[in-house]
Image (cartoon, grey):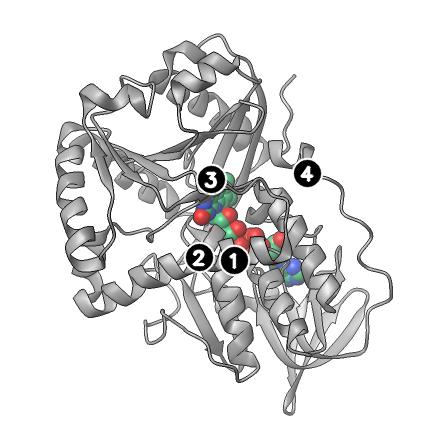
């Protein structure tokens, strides 16, 4: 029987009750959203002695942070050459360095707080869908070494079985610096750290309106209104009317995942021998990995609309077909979980962090947010306290998206990317 919840929710311990008091009338900072961005920010704010309240409209970590692939990736959405093309070499170096800083920040945080989230420095594989994509990897390897001082390995198709038990791909790029974790355990661990540091966390408490009241803000919830000196919007792909102005500058995309039943250990070891996390070179990419109990977790952007129960079921079928193309051995293996979540993209697919009309925000990770959301959450918290911090995405324009009238244009986006996969 297919379970329509994330596999991660079933395998993460239940949180202790963190909301032990009623909503306060005042706070120094209200953080809206309890994913990695909001919780990482709340932890730093609380550690710096700031009186911080986190509001979550569902349960702690409910959004993308407890549903993702758990791939802790170096780099950004754009590969190294595209990055240079888009922002120039100097800026590209800064942005790439920020991605490496983000994985180190996450790794240090997990070690410092002793968060049990199955983190390993597994490394990641990029798998070439076409021969031409592998040639591009050769170029990317040179660019990474020359411009970003970052070393990766290439594995050609013949040697591929040492890293990936699939005939579908045309060679691999191996980056040893990436990692893997259990996303829901990590989100829940962060919630415990933020709470333990002194942040007050409230779930099932949506912010429904943010109003300016002189130099302060009134954050309205069904449980009462909080007056705060500052507000941080950390709602990423779930941004709603409460933060409308910021929501007009980003848009959500559905990403979908399935998990098989546990595989025999020898089969798991044949498919992904070093238990690295993997994504491929398609525009409509597949990403996959093994869980600690040897399930194949297989994801993709199988649908370009905000997920529904029906689209999640349909996408599970599409993903299953994709998985069997990649790993024919899994043809008869039952799927036990299917789920979906929202990623958040900006116009140029770079994250954003800053202030709009006085309200702070950090979001738009374009499916690369496990490390970056953690990092930018920490950085924006430092900025809010006047402490030293880094904003690698400053100065990038953050205008409302043109022609963004809701969902109608997304099917055209989907078609565009599917065609790229056929013709590129
Ligand atoms: C299926 C999937 C797979 C992914 N795989 C990877 C991966 O392998 N590697 C990677 O790096 N990234 C991945 N990502 C992206 C990554 O998960 C996100 O970038 C990251 O979790 C974003 O964290 P966040 O805290 O900014 O947002 P979220 O975790 O989405 O949290 C936002 C929260 O805000 C809450 N909220 C919204 N509005 C309000 C309101 N008005 N009041 C109160 N609360 C509100 C929501 O309920 C939600 O819990 C994936 C995403 C998805 C969906």
Mark 2 vs ligand 1: CB under 8 Å? no
Measured Cα–Cα span from mark 2 to mark 3: 26 Å
Q: Is 284 placed left or right of 369 in the picture?
A: left
Residue ID for mark 3: 255
Q: Residue at x 53, y 41 (%)?
A: 181
State whether residue 173 is above or below residue 355: above
Q: Position of residue 163 (x, y in %)?
A: 32, 26
Question: Which one is nearer the viewer's eye here, 228 or 278?
Answer: 278
State whether residue 155 is above or below residue 321: below
Q: Residue at x 32, y 62 (%)?
A: 97
Measured Cα–Cα span from mark 2 to mark 1: 6 Å
Question: Which picture quadrant has residue 87?
Answer: bottom left
Q: Is 225 placed left or right of 309 in the picture?
A: right
Give the mark nearer the N terminus: 2 vs 4: 4
Residue ID for mark 4: 12
Q: In the rendered structure, find residue 104 and report the number of the disc placed on it.
A: 2
Measured Cα–Cα span from mark 4 to mark 3: 21 Å
């Amino acid at each position: 029987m297919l379970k329509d919840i994330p596999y991660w929710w079933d395998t993460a311990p239940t949180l202790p009750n963190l909301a032990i008091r009623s909503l306060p009338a005042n706070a120094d900072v209200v953080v809206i959203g309890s994913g990695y961005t909001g919780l990482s920010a709340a932890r730093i704010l609380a550690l710096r002695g700031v009186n911080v309240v986190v509001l979550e409209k569902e349960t702690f970590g409910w959004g993308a942070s407890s549903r993702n692939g758990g791939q802790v990736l170096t780099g950004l959405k754009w590969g190294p050459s595209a990055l240079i093309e888009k922002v120039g070499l100097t800026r590209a170096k800064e942005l790439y360095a920020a991605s490496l800083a983000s994985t180190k920040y996450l790794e240090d945080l997990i070690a410092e707080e002793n968060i049990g989230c199955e983190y390993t420095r597994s490394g990641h594989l990029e798998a070439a869908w076409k021969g031409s994509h592998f040639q591009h990897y050769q170029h990317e390897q040179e660019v990474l070494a020359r411009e970003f001082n970052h070393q990766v390995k290439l594995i050609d198709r013949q040697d591929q079985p040492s890293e990936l038990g699939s005939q579908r791909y045309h060679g691999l790029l191996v980056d040893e610096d990436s990692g893997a974790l259990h996303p829901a355990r990590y989100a829940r661990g962060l919630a415990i750290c933020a709470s333990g540091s002194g942040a007050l966390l409230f779930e099932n408490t949506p912010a429904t309106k943010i109003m300016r009241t002189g130099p302060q803000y009134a954050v309205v919830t069904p449980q009462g209104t909080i007056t705060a000196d500052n507000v941080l919007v950390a709602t990423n792909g779930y941004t709603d009317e409460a933060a409308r102005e910021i929501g007009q500058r980003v848009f959500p995309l559905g990403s979908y995942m399935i998990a098989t039943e546990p595989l025999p250990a020898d089969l798991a070891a044949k498919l992904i021998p070093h238990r690295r996390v993997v994504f491929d070179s398609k525009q409509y990419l597949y990403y996959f990995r093994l869980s600690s109990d040897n399930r194949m977790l297989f994801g993709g952007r199988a649908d370009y609309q905000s997920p529904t129960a029906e689209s999640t079921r349909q996408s599970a079928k599409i993903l299953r077909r994709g998985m069997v193309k990649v790993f024919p051995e899994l043809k008869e293996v039952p799927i036990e979980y299917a789920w979906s979540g929202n990623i958040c993209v900006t116009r140029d697919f770079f994250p954003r962090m800053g202030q709009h009309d006085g309200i702070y925000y950090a979001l738009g990770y374009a499916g690369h947010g496990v490390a970056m959301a953690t990092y930018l959450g920490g950085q924006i918290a430092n900025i809010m306290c006047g402490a030293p911090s880094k904003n690698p995405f400053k100065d990038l324009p953050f205008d409302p998206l043109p022609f963004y009238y809701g969902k109608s244009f997304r099917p055209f986006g989907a078609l565009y990317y599917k065609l790229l996969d056929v013709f590129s």
